[in-house]
Image (cartoon, grey):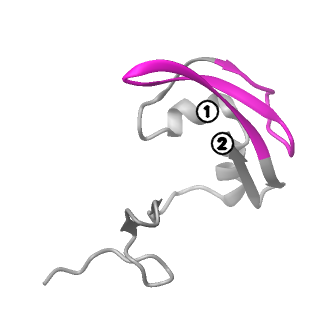
């Protein structure tokens, strides 16, 4: 029997029926430094582990609540995606959706 990775709620960290993936990693940076990277859309290609964020970016220099930003992506075929910041608390929380 193997020990599968588990999320905080005890479910498998990768459960296809929930479509949620959970990963933990230590980052030798302050919370403010991490937030600054996330709030700067020009840094997103650097932190994108999938390699799909590419090309031209249309975005403000720093994200804020309600900000829209778009970028070129590529998964088999090139496409554009536009995101809107839906959660924002300076230095604490940021979230966007498309």
CB atoms of marks 2 and 1 within 8 Å: yes
Q: Is residue 64 above or below residue 94?
A: above
Q: Secondary structure at mark 1?
A: helix
Chief SS of the magenta region: strand
Dot 1: within a 10 Å radius of its alpha carbon, few (fewer than 14), some, or many (20 or more) residues?
few
Considering only order in the chain, which callout, 1 or 2, is on the residue closer to the N terminus? 2
Apparent side of residue 26 relative to residue 35 in the rendered image (left or right): left
Q: Is residue 85 above or below residue 87?
A: above
What segment carries the magenta color? 57-85
Residue 58, x across and y down, in percent? 72, 20
Q: What residue is drawn where x is 86% and y is 46%?
A: 65
Q: Is residue 50 magenta?
A: no
Apparent side of residue 16 relative to residue 30 in the rendered image (left or right): left
Residue 52, x across and y down, in percent? 45, 30
Most extreme residue toward the front is 17
Q: How many marks?
A: 2
Which image quarter holds the N terminus?
A: bottom left
Q: Using the rendered view, name the quadrant where residue 64 is placed.
A: top right
Apparent side of residue 12 relative to residue 73 in the rendered image (left or right): left
Q: Secondary structure at mark 2?
A: helix
Q: Nearer the viewer, residue 78 or 67?
A: 78
Q: Is residue 12 above or below residue 47?
A: below
Q: Using the rendered view, name the quadrant where residue 6 is placed.
A: bottom left
Residue 98, x across and y down, in percent? 67, 39
Name the residue that disc number 2 marks. 37
Q: Is residue 69 magenta?
A: yes
Q: What residue is drawn where x is 66% and y is 42%?
A: 37
Dot 2: within a 10 Å radius of its alpha carbon, few (fewer than 14), some, or many (20 or more) residues?
some
Residue 3, x across and y down, in percent? 23, 81
Name the residue that disc number 1 marks. 43
Q: Nearer the viewer, residue 10 or 44?
A: 10
Q: Using the rendered view, name the quadrant where residue 38 is placed.
A: top right
């Amino acid at each position: 029997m193997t020990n599968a990775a588990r999320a905080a709620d005890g479910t498998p960290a990768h459960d296809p029926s929930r479509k949620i993936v959970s990963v933990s990693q230590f980052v030798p940076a302050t919370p403010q430094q991490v937030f600054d990277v996330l709030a700067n859309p020009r840094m997103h290609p650097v932190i994108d582990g999938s390699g799909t964020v590419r090309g031209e970016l249309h975005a403000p220099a720093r994200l804020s609540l309600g900000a829209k930003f778009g970028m070129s992506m590529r998964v088999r075929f090139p496409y554009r995606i536009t995101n809107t910041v839906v959660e924002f608390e300076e230095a604490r929380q940021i979230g966007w959706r498309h």
